[in-house]
Amino acid sequence: MTEEIIKYDPSFTEATFLTKADHIYMMMLDAVMEKDLNEVKHYLSEKVYEYLNSMVSDYTSRNVIRIFDETNVKTSSIDSYYTDEETINIVVNLTSRYMDYFIDDDGNYLYGTNDHRIEREHRIVFTKKFNVKHLNEARPCPSCGHSLDINASGICPYCKQVIDMSNYDYIVSEIDSI
C-alpha cells in the first residue's frame, strides 16, 4: 500500500508518517488533559478541533480534569487510504494504553480507571491536500508576514496566529473517540 500512497505523496514514508501520527495522538491527549488545545490545534481539522474543544469546555464547566496517566501508543498501522479530487486520506488504526480518570480542581480523585491501564482502539483519518507546499521551505506568516519555521510550531512566534497546517502536511480530519 505504501507504494500506492507514494504515487499521490512522493515524500511519504510509512515509518515517519506513523511516528508523526503517534505523536499527534499523544499531543491530543495532553491538550485535553491540560485543557489547552493551542499546541495541537494546527494539526486538527476544524471538525476535530470543535470535538475536542467541546470536550474541554464540558470538563471546564464541571470543574473536572481528565487525566490520561501512564500513556503510550502500543501499535499503529495504516489500515487503508482513499483519495478525492483535492486530498489523500490515510486511515490509521491506533491502539493506546493508559489510565483514564477524572479529578477535581483540588486533585481529588472523582471517578474512572486509576489503578490499571486500559487499552483502547482508535480509528484516525489523516488528510493531506494535493500539491501542498514543502514544510522545509521558509514561509511568511499569512497574518503578519514574518518568516516561519513551520516544523517548529504551528503558531507564529510574532503575532501568535495559528498556521493552517493543511497547506503543508497531514492533519487529523477524523477521530472516533478520545
Image (spheres, helix red, strand yellow):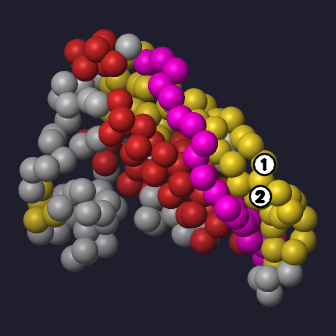
Residue 150 has which mark? none
- Residue, disc 1: 118
Q: Is residue 46 among what the camera can see?
A: no
Q: Where is residue 159 in the image (x, y as percent from the top left)?
A: 25, 74
Residue 100 has which mark? 2
* Residue occupying the point 29% across, 41% down: 169
Q: In which quarter of the image is residue 114?
A: bottom right
- Circle 2 SS class: strand
* Residue occupying the point 63% across, 38% down: 95
- Circle 1 SS class: strand
* Residue occupying the point 57% across, 30% down: 93
Of residues 26 and 162, which is closer to you in this image?
26
Is residue 110 on the magenta stretch? Answer: no
The answer for how far apart the CA atoms under marks 1 and 2 are is 8 Å
Of residues 132 and 102, which is closer to you in this image?
102
* Residue occupying the point 86% across, 81% down: 108
Q: In which quarter of the image is residue 143?
A: bottom left
- Picture layout, residue 144 above or below residue 129: below
Classify mark 2: residues with Cα within 10 Å, few (<14), some (14-19) or many (20+).
some
From which residue to which does the magenta span run? 61-81
Which quarter of the image is occupied by the N terminus?
top left
Overall secondary structure of the magenta stretch? strand
